[in-house]
Image: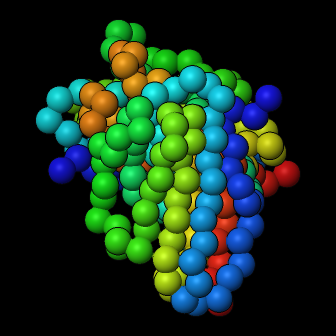
């Protein structure tokens, strides 16, 4: 069984469109994250949710809005897509509340904005 | 703010040779330390982690890492590299549940 899954795996769209990426984890974890990996492979955290509540919101344009309907899901909605949004987006989860914070990553969603 | 540096952007080794990937962090206390591997087109997989105790930690796939407080380093090693080890390697730091910071990554190429 897949622990952290993301859909879609690839997303190609035009500038100005609105798109969503879905993430689900079946690990029973309390905390979920979204990361952006740019073309140079640099990974940067965007958001962190603990039990459906936002706990980290790095400097990200407000065109990006995370939505957590329950603690197993954290979706990322992006409005008015721009060329610079092209990247690979990773979802991750961790068992916050334990003594450490190992993160489990999804396979990534490659977003290409034309 | 804490930071993680990986001085080597790209390393090439021959199959069977030993490997050391460097990682340095900047943080006031001893953070939790991780090494992840990303194979081409894949997500990140945890290789090993350090929280406390023995400064030499063993991970999966024959990797190990040594925490050196005096050098603020957490270098990853493997005695004999396999062609399947070619990937991107990320060092990461977590400050007691607050934030997770990744280094810029080191790309490993393996020559046959």
Is any atom of residue B90 visible in this view? no
Q: Is residue B7 above or below residue A52?
A: below
Q: How many marks?
A: 0
> Is B12 placed left or right of A73 in the picture?
right
For this orientation, the residue located farthest to the top is: B53
Q: x and y percent of residue B89 in the render?
A: 57, 47
Q: Residue at x 58, y 90 (%)?
A: A15
Q: x and y percent of residue B106 in the render?
A: 54, 54
Q: x and y percent of residue B51 in the render?
A: 36, 19
Front residue of B88 and A10: A10
Is any atom of residue B3 visible in this view? yes
Report the coloring of the rendering: rainbow
> Is B24 placed left or right of A87 in the picture?
left
**Occupied quadrant, residue A46:** bottom left
Front residue of A36 and A76: A76
For this orientation, the residue located farthest to the left is: B28
Q: x and y percent of residue A45 in the render?
A: 40, 54
Q: Is residue A55 above or below residue B46?
A: below
Q: Residue at x 38, y 35 (%)?
A: A50
Front residue of A79 and A48: A79
**Occupied quadrant, residue A114:** bottom right
Q: Residue at x 74, y 60 (%)?
A: A9
Q: Residue at x 51, y 37 (%)?
A: A70
For this orientation, the residue located farthest to the front is: A69
Front residue of A87 and B104: A87
> Is B13 placed left or right of B101 in the picture?
right
């Amino acid at each position: 069984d897949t622990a952290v899954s993301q859909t879609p795996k690839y997303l190609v769209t035009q500038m100005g469109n609105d798109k969503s990426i879905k993430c689900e984890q079946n690990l029973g974890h309390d905390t979920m994250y979204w990361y952006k990996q740019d073309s140079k492979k640099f990974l940067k955290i965007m958001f962190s949710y603990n039990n459906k509540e936002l706990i980290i919101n790095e400097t990200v344009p407000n065109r990006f809005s995370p939505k957590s309907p329950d603690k197993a899901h954290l979706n990322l909605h992006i409005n008015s897509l721009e060329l610079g949004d092209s990247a690979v987006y990773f979802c991750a989860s961790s068992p916050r509340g334990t003594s450490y914070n190992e993160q489990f990553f999804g396979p990534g969603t490659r977003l290409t904005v034309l | 703010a804490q930071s993680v540096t990986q001085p080597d952007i790209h390393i090439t080794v021959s199959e069977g040779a030993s490997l050391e990937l460097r990682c340095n962090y900047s943080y006031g206390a001893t953070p939790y330390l991780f090494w992840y591997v990303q194979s081409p087109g894949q997500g990140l997989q945890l290789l090993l982690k350090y929280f406390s105790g023995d400064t030499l930690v063993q991970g999966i796939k024959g990797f190990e890492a040594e925490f050196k407080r005096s050098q603020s380093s957490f270098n990853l090693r493997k005695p004999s590299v396999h062609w399947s080890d070619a990937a991107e390697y990320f060092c990461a730091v977590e400050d007691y549940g607050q934030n997770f910071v990744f280094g810029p990554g080191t790309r490993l190429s393996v020559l046959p």
